[in-house]
Image (cartoon, rainbow, N blue to C red):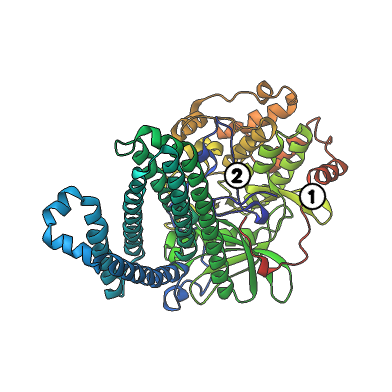
Amino acid sequence: MAQDQANGNCPHVGFPSDPQASPATTADWSRKPITDDGLAAGEALPALRPALVKQASPSLQLQVRDLLHRRLKIIALLFSLYLVIDQILEPQAWRLFYSELSVFLTRRPAQFVTEIVIPLGCVALTGVIWGRRSLSLRQLRSIELAIVGLAAGSGVLVLHSSALRFYGAPSAQIYADQAARYLSSEASNWALWLVGYGLFIPNTWRRCVLVTSFLAILPLLTVGVLCLGPEVPPGWSEPVLREALPQMALVLAVGAVLAIYGTHKITTLREVAHATRQLGQYKLSRRLGAGGMGEVYLAEHRLLKRPCAVKLIRPEKAADAAMLHRFEREVQAMTRLTHWNVVEVFDYGHTEDGTFYYVMEYLPGLTLEDLVRKHGPLPPGRAVHLLRQVCAALGEAHSKSLIHRDLKPGNVIVGERGGVHDVAKLLDFGLVQETDLGDAPDRLTHHGVLVGTPAYLSPEQANGVAQLLPSSDIYSLGAMAYFLVTGQPPFVRPSVVQTITAHLSDPVAPPAKLRPEVPADLEQVIVTCLAKRPDRRFQDANSLEQALKRCTCAGQWTQADAAAWWQTQGQPPPSPGLRVQSARNE
């Protein structure tokens, strides 16, 4: 089953997905859509948008901000009390501070920072976070990093000064033994701090990786610099570098991994719980994908017990009128299409807090992108079998004046439906455009605006043509066919600009040049689709489907072949019901 991807979509539910790894010659951006900033074409669904603001309740982001504020209050207060009691109230520190301040600053600056500067800084941060009720998430994150920095600085200074105590050992072996025991203890303490940070601070796993990596490397760097510096004899530091430091690194690595994993799981459960509270008649199980426009969850209708997928857009994102229009346009386009090879939409609405969502059929399977990346180029007969189904779905869309504008392998999912294997479903109509708007002022795209996915753009899209024709989708479908039979898009270039330029002017290499087993008649169909001039391509999806049907390999892939393939490769399991308690984000 395909892995969840970062485009806000997932192959299980009819949204595009990027593979986890791509060939070295293919840039990651080549499969990510470039969206426009225009408003939606067509009428909006009635009585939905006015409730967005006046009924809004705290969003997930606001909840995270409030939770972070409360927890930073606790952390700052406890840390300040500890430092004040342990350092500032220590009589010796103040006696040195008053009587020998110059000596304290010049000869013992590290002790001055540890015992005076860091505690006072933490007290000041505590005053800020307790004294102000309204702090933005960015301000709270800055305070969080400041507290982490003070704690890390204090720990490093204490580690450095404590390690120097072993310098007085009578032999290198004694020094190494004492240092190893001390460093092992300190590594365990640092690892516990890392785990505590990951579990207590609401965070994203990516941000947690950055912070915990810094905190894990800091004590290792401190010990390494100390052992290689002039304060410790080289003969004494060698055993520490050889034995104690690797053990210390292992303990810190375990702590960092546990922190990152804990952050990831807690964040996922928090998001699922937030979404579950809002979508009353649907129980959300696990997140299938998340991205710029929305999130997709595996769900179940509370009464019908029917597995489904829910795509939603959060209130903070729905405030963007262009994004909300695009979201509504996607729903409207999909509900207008009834073909077997188009994903089916069950429901659409919004919740009291302003979360917009729509519900669609749950599709276990693989996108064409994942199918080729994981199993290699398709046999010509299978490629034709799947492409004809996409043509059928595209034909209905074109008959209803809808241009998809983002046809690519990641937007077609293949699986089993109704006992039939290798059923292709056309997905993701987020960039759809109507062809009958003419010069209407609310037309989605204006001339010069580039939309689509660079690796599969038609030359018209690359030129920024505002009103596209069905022949534009035919070109993109030809690029998809090229990918299916060769394993790569028609043009693989190191940058987006070079890829767009190639669509405009470079001749395409014949598929048989990359894979000699591609039949000549299928190659001719693909090359015709990829003609630079629209009038030299197939003019509609039906003509293309008929041309594919006439290919000699058209009947070589049968239902028996498809069933055998899925049985061998692992058929997607049925989903008779969902268990919300076992929410996972894979």
Label 2 – label 1 distance at C-alpha? 25 Å
Q: Residue at x 13, y 62 (%)?
A: 98
Identify residue type, mark 1.
Answer: Gln
Q: Residue at x 74, y 74 (%)?
A: 304
Can residue 445 be seen here? Answer: no
Contact flag, marks 2 and 1 (Cβ < 8 Å): no
Say which element carries label 1: loop
Front residue of 514/542: it is: 514
Res 271 → quadrant = bottom right
Q: Residue at x 26, y 70 (%)?
A: 128
Left or right relative to 507: residue 108: left
Residue mark closest to the camera, 2 vs 1: 1
In the image, residue 240 lies at what x, y percent?
A: 44, 40
The crowd level at tag 1 (other Cα within 10 Å; few <14, some 14-19, many 20+) is some
Residue 558 in the image: above or below residue 519: below
The crowd level at tag 2 (other Cα within 10 Å; few <14, some 14-19, many 20+) is many
In the image, residue 415 lies at what x, y percent?
A: 75, 50
Callout count: 2
Say which element carries label 2: loop
Left or right relative to 204: residue 118: left
Task: Check the image and name the residue furthest to the front.
Answer: 170
Going from N to C along the chain, the mark reached first, 2 or 1, is 2
Residue under label 2, please give it: 407
Front residue of 507/267: it is: 267
In the image, residue 407 lies at what x, y percent?
A: 60, 44
Can residue 458 be seen here? Answer: yes
Identify residue type, mark 2.
Answer: Leu
Q: Quadrant of the C terminus?
A: bottom right
In the image, residue 57 lies at what x, y percent?
A: 45, 76
Res 279 → quadrant = bottom right
Task: Check the image and name the residue furthest to the right.
Answer: 560
Residue under label 1, please give it: 571
